[in-house]
Image (spheres, helix red, strand yellow):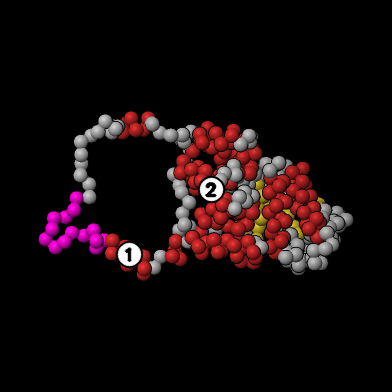
Amino acid sequence: MPLYIVRNDITTMKVDAIVNAANESLLGGGGVDGAIHRAAGPGLLAECRTLGGCATGQAKITKGYRLPAAHVIHTVGPVWRGGHYGEKDLLVSAYRNSLELAREHHCQTVAFPLISSGVYGYPKDQALKVAVDTIGEFLLGHDMTVYLVVFDRAAYTIGGKLFADIAAYIDDRYVEDHTGSEEEEYRRSIALAAAPAPGAAPARLWEPGPRTAQAVSLDEALKRLDESFSQMLLRKIDEKGMTDAQCYKKANIDRKLFSKIRSDVHYKPSKPTAMAFAVALELPLEEARELLEKAGFAFSHASKFDIIVEYFIAHRNYNIFEINEALFAFDQSLLG
């Protein structure tokens, strides 16, 4: 059921259905619409002629013809007129009706362009937010994999204030920006202070001592292992009163992957997966760190990815789709 934001050519996507940002005639046009018609061939136009057009905010479906996708879902987004003429509601409707049509035709994988963000003039940051919020809400109740396909990563950015706030948070914490000659001089001074004087015997950094009563064998130590990541995750889900499905959907995690985690007490997730569950569980920052530690990871201030996720958790914003918008805007991999 995850939502992915990818940079690709939608006409090459091997999915059950691609969505065409069409005009009301459904007879082809410029931009994504024209590209899809060219790639699909004349059969698509011939079928579209039988559909009688499509109203703004609605959707209709055809075969994919020469496209790798089996279906094309045609939807008409609103023309931007300043935001005071119901543009947002119409754009939400275009996404929802397209998703419902895909569900009715048993599509498991669907690829969307950013509807109305081209010649129709919908501001790209607002169009991205509508797309992510609407698709994300749908996926909380349905099992489907959705791709939001864009051509130019730099053109699709989150809101200016949020971007600036995250950029400042990164600047305050990013290790790479704060390592320089002063720290290097400090490290050298520490090393020189620890060095023995000329002619002196080298210092012994560690002296083996007698085994105390507190010491244990390796086998004994291994028997004292704390709960695993999987055990902690399942305990936290129960404590939050969530179902498994609610948790893995909020984490933007595939059901099959969650099944692996549940069935294997020693499962070691990737760092983005562990972070995604911390977000889904809405853990405070300290508890999020604890969950990451169970998977063998920690938040690192040498990683922009880590700092951005930490920013959202610290600000108690647990909308994973908004977090992924921000990660995409900063050219980072996504959660889930």
Q: Let me know if residue 4 appears in the view.
A: no
Q: Secondary structure at mark 2?
A: helix
Percent x, y for residue 240? 61, 36
Q: Nearer the viewer, residue 140 or 3?
A: 140
Percent x, y for residue 263? 52, 32
Question: For the residue marked with disc 1, what is the amino acid?
Answer: Tyr
In primary-sequence order, the first of circles 2 and 1 is 1
Give the quadrant of residue 198.
Answer: bottom left
Q: Nearer the viewer, residue 242 or 253?
A: 242
What count of labels does the image hold? Answer: 2
Question: To which residue does mark 1 refer?
Answer: 186
Residue at mark 2 to residue at mark 1: CA–CA distance: 31 Å
Question: To which residue does mark 2 refer?
Answer: 285
Labelled disc at residue 91 = none
Dominant secondary-structure state across the stretch colored magenta: loop
Kindly identify the residue that appears in the image at 19 percent across and 50 percent down. Answer: 204
Percent x, y for residue 178? 43, 65
Q: Nearer the viewer, residue 325 or 216?
A: 216
Vertical comparison of 226 with 120: above or below? above
Outermost residue on the right side: it is: 52
Magenta stretch? 191-204
Would you say 132 lies left or right of 104 here? left
Give the quadrant of residue 117.
Answer: bottom right
Outermost residue on the bottom side: it is: 181
Is 314 colored magenta in this rendering? Answer: no
Question: For the residue marked with disc 2, what is the amino acid?
Answer: Leu
Kindly identify the residue that appears in the image at 66 percent across and 50 percent down. Answer: 146
Kindly identify the residue that appears in the image at 49 percent across and 38 percent down. Answer: 229
